[in-house]
Amino acid sequence: MPQAKDIVIPATARPRIRFNADTVFKGVTVVAAVVVPIIIAGIFWELLILSWPALKKFGWRFFVTEVWNPVTQQFGAASSIYGTVISTLIAMVLAVPMSIVIALFLVELAPRSVSKVVSNLIELLAAIPSIIYGMWGLFIFAPFMAKYVQPFLGQHLGFLPLFTGPPMGIGMLTAGVILAFMILPFITAICRDVFSLVPPVLKESGYGVGATTWEVTYKITLPYGIVGVLGGIFLGLGRALGETMAVTFVIGNTHKISLSLFAPGNSIASSLANEFAEATEPIYLSSLIALGLVLFLFTFLVQVISQIMLRRLYRGWSIKL
Amino acid sequence: MKKIVCLLALIGCLVAAGVAQAQVTINGAGASFPYPVYSKWAHKYHELTKVKVNYQSIGSGGGIAQIKAKTVDFGATDDPLKVEELKTEGLFQFPTLIGGVVPIFNVPGVEAGKLTLSPEVLVDIFMGKIKNWNDPAIAKLNAGVKLPDLPITVVHRADGSGTTWIFTNYLSKVSPEWKEKVGNAKAVSWPTGMGAKGNEGVANNVKQVSGSIGYVEYAYATINKIPYAKLINKAGKAVVPSLESFKAAAAAADWKSAPGFYMVLTDLPGENTWPIVGATFILIHKEQLNAEKAKETLKFFDWAFKHGDAIAQELHYVTMPDSVVALIQEGWSKEVKLAERTGLKQLWP
């Protein structure tokens, strides 16, 4: 076997080739890396420029009025922003506790073989295209909600304004639940990784002093991984905010703010998906782009926060990012 | 030697075939409503003449924008351009197909064709004034039909669409209140209900939600087998939507005195006339620069008018009556010209 040092490269050829390849490689990577921030800045700039006519015409009231009338050309983003926030909130309320519980089960309790299979299945959920969730939501889940879940909620929690109105199956609640299904695998996967990174010596010490599984989970695993869990939650949040097709199928697409979760509503993403193609009037188009700008800022903010959280976590483990 | 000659002959044949193949391609874009028919026409026409017609279903708004920008040979739109706009843009507009918009419903216990609605009741439902299926106003029109105590859910289009334009045009015509409060457009601010994307979206939502009512192109109602309602027309008769009642509407319209074929076929007189009918239109530039393409475009639509009926009917659309086709072709020869250095030259026939 020749050793690496045995291979002789002619002295004349060596520096030139290495120099070139390195330069090219460096150039390519630098360009590729620089392109990303440029594109982001470009998108932001373009959104700002194109939404300017609407923002100028409607002013700050654009963000607080519910009116969305293509006939009179009066537009307000309030219902879309409200719908985005509420549907995301429902998704988070449902998905976060469930994700953490699933992750804890996979890491702490499940036998290795079960853990492996379930982990793979959950990751498979993440790979399903969102339009499939939407179709499933419309054809199977919405009728299920209308028939069983909403009448049940209306009967037992109907005194709350949240659960009033006819059970149509399509509306804010269904959209939120579908979103929860979609972000569940993301949060679960991150939580699982975070929990499995807890140093065994910590847990073993816990068990050593006689702690139960619950105590170890509650007092060691969770606090240790909390920042990572938060990072995962924000990642899920980012996805829920921008989710388009699945939401469009089941949210009901109405520019109205209703207190009832059974009522149809809309989100920024669903409004854009629906209306962009046929918005020919300049102010209509500009208003839609302004909605896009709001969503861009929302998700950007969420991503920044999640990055900060994850970074802090990794720093805590002295892993350089 | 013989082999080489054979080979050369073969190559020659292939090249010749290739040349014959590489004929004109006509590009069009616009409304999604006539897309099934246009694409089938194009397919058949290609088989017959080897002329390729590409039609992209990008929506009426897109079609208008594309033809204005001259990136396509023809644009297609569901809501006709007004005469003034045609003039400033130098466009010629003509109708190709007629389709009906029908109210579809999902009320347990009420079968297809058993529900009759009057214009007033239809408006009040879509206004959100009539909220339950057991409302006396509906019951009065439907003696003998058992209407359940079920809240009404209105399903409308969430995207801008020609279907909505035709439907709200009808509602505006029969109700001054609708005209004032909501209006007539491709997208409006709906007083009540939920939105769905596309005809298929409305059809699906109506299928899923018990107690719902929506409106779709006739073809979607028939293909999806969703019960549709009868409507009382201007003559006071309850009509069933059908290709015949759409044709009656086209025949009832006075195309001759409609410059630019600007014609809305809603709420027209006639005993058998379905009241919510719309035409879909083609836009071409009056001054054509490419003689071959312009001629082929007109030839394609000429063929479609003459031989496209069967395909259109198969897909539940109605082609224009012969009298209207004659008017259209008269317009072609009078208004669509080839722009040459020496001046304008007649293109058709």
Image (spheres, helix red, strand yellow):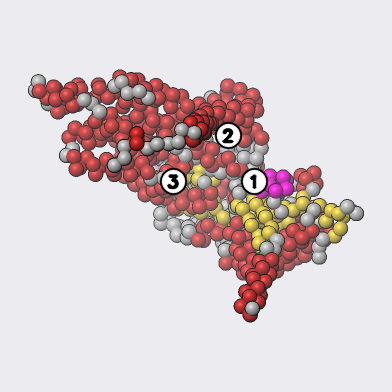
* Residue A131 - label: 3
Task: Confirm whether circles 1 and 2 share one chain.
Answer: no
The residue tagged with tag 2: helix, strand or loop? helix
Residue under numbered circle 1: B62
Task: Confirm whether circles 3 and 1 share one chain.
Answer: no
Residue located at (53% from left, 24% from top): A64
| Viewport quadrant of the N terminus of chain B | bottom right
| Type of secondary structure dominating the magenta stretch | helix
Q: Quarter-wise, where is residue A8 in the image?
A: top left
Q: Position of residue A130 (x, y in %)?
A: 42, 43
Residue located at (19% from left, 21% from top): A219
Q: Position of residue A280 (x, y in %)?
A: 65, 40
Rendered position, A210 above or below A240: above
In this view, the residue in front, B199 or B170, is: B199
Please name the amino acid that badge 1 sits on: Gly
Please name the amino acid that badge 2 sits on: Leu
Q: Position of residue A84 (x, y in %)?
A: 46, 32
Q: How many marks?
A: 3
Whether label 2 touches label 3, CB < 8 Å = no
Query: Image check: B332 left or right of B103?
Result: right
Task: Return the chain for callout 3.
Answer: A
Residue under numbered circle 2: A288
In this view, the residue in front, B16 or A71, is: B16
Rendered position, B133 above or below A209: below
Q: CA distance from mark 1 to mark 2?
A: 16 Å
